[in-house]
Image (tube, helix red, strand yellow):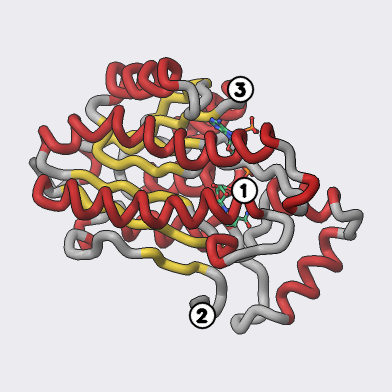
Amino acid sequence: MSDDASTRTALVTGGARGIGAAIAHRLSRDGFAVGVVDLDEAGAVATAEAITAAGGRAVGVGADVADEARANAAVATVTDRLGPVLALVNNAGVIRDNLLFRMSVDDWDTVLGVHLRGAFLMTRAVQAQMVEAGWGRIVNLSSTSALGNRGQVNYAAAKAGMQGFTKTLAIELGRFGVIANAIAPGFIETEMTRATAARVGADFDAWAQAAAQEIPVGRIGRPDDIAGVASFLCSEDAAFVSGQVIYVAGGPKD
Ligand code: NAP
């Protein structure tokens, strides 16, 4: 296997917007062909078209990562169009926040389903390609909420689960040249955090400014802050880094 990322394909879930779109663009600039998979098919295609317009190779595919048949089909489509998937970024995510006593079973199942079942299905679908190549990179999106966050018992459980999932992938796949790591972002400005502000009736800018005062580097995060770390974790330089959780939150987290 060549060390040249231009011979490799990456697949980014939830790549229609936000952090996933930033990661997809960054991996393209790093030389990967990029499969962009999202529930929002038009958004996935738009990200892929923007990558292509910038000189990269990309394909956009609509799929629910929590649906076994759709997840497998998305991997098959990306593989057919761009070649074996040797880097996978499990980024697709949803929030359904509520205090425990008000949380519905649907909201619990949806959040656990997209993050954990989705990451499991996508990873299971690509792992044989990585093992065959003797080279692979898996990046899972966790969150500082994995440490506990009021109103997010479902999301916190899912994001803590992503960390155990990641460490176990690292143990099982390391001998095949496949590394697995998790990124745990703090407050990143995306539609997800804008939706959270709207739901609690807060003005986003005032809310973000207040949050920034609590963050050691003095600002909230941007999707590119996460994309830079994902780029490293998909690179040759990360070859001896596996099973790690990297908090990208502008300061330390326990
Ligand atoms: P976002 O702007 O809401 O984007 C998430 C994307 O995932 C959307 O395009 C969404 O599609 C897609 N998606 C949702 N469910 C899906 C499914 N079942 N199958 C395929 N795609 C699906 O979120 P973001 O802020 O960029 O977050 C990206 C990741 O980072 C998530 O895992 C999130 O939990 C994590 N994270 C974010 C922050 C933050 O502060 N923003 C902090 C920590 C962790 P639709 O538009 O169709 O729903």
Q: CA distance from mark 2 to mark 3?
A: 37 Å
Q: Residues within 10 Å of mark 1 (few under 14, many from 20)?
A: many
Q: Compare residues 164 and 92 and report the one nearer the observer.
A: 164
Q: Compare residues 152 and 194 and report the one nearer the observer.
A: 152
**Up-down relation of residue 85 to residue 150 (above or below):** above
Q: Residues within 10 Å of mark 2 (few under 14, many from 20)?
A: few
Badge 2 vs badge 3, beta-carbon distance below 8 Å: no
Residue at 37% from the left image edge and 55% from the top image edge: 164
Query: Label 2 CB, ligand 1: below 8 Å?
Result: no
**Up-down relation of residue 234 to residue 115 (above or below):** below
Q: Secondary structure at mark 1?
A: helix
In-image side of 251 versus 77 (left or right): right
2 or 3: tag closer to the N-terminus: 3
| Occupied quadrant, residue 82 | top left
Query: Would residue 194 be seen by someone viewing this image from the given angle?
Result: no
2 or 1: tag closer to the N-terminus: 1
Query: Label 1 CB, ligand 1: below 8 Å?
Result: no
Numbered disc in front, either 3 or 1: 1
Q: Amino acid at mark 2?
A: Pro
Q: Secondary structure at mark 2?
A: loop
Q: CA distance from mark 3 to mark 1?
A: 28 Å
Q: Which residue is mark 3?
A: 42
Q: Secondary structure at mark 3?
A: helix
Badge 3 vs badge 1, beta-carbon distance below 8 Å: no
Q: Which residue is mark 1?
A: 154
Residue at 63% from the left image edge and 60% from the top image edge: 188
**Up-down relation of residue 163 to residue 123 (above or below):** below
Residue at 53% from the left image edge and 34% from the top image edge: 113
Residue 154 coordinates in the image, percent (x, y): 62, 48
Q: Amino acid at mark 1?
A: Asn
In-image side of 198 versus 174 (left or right): right
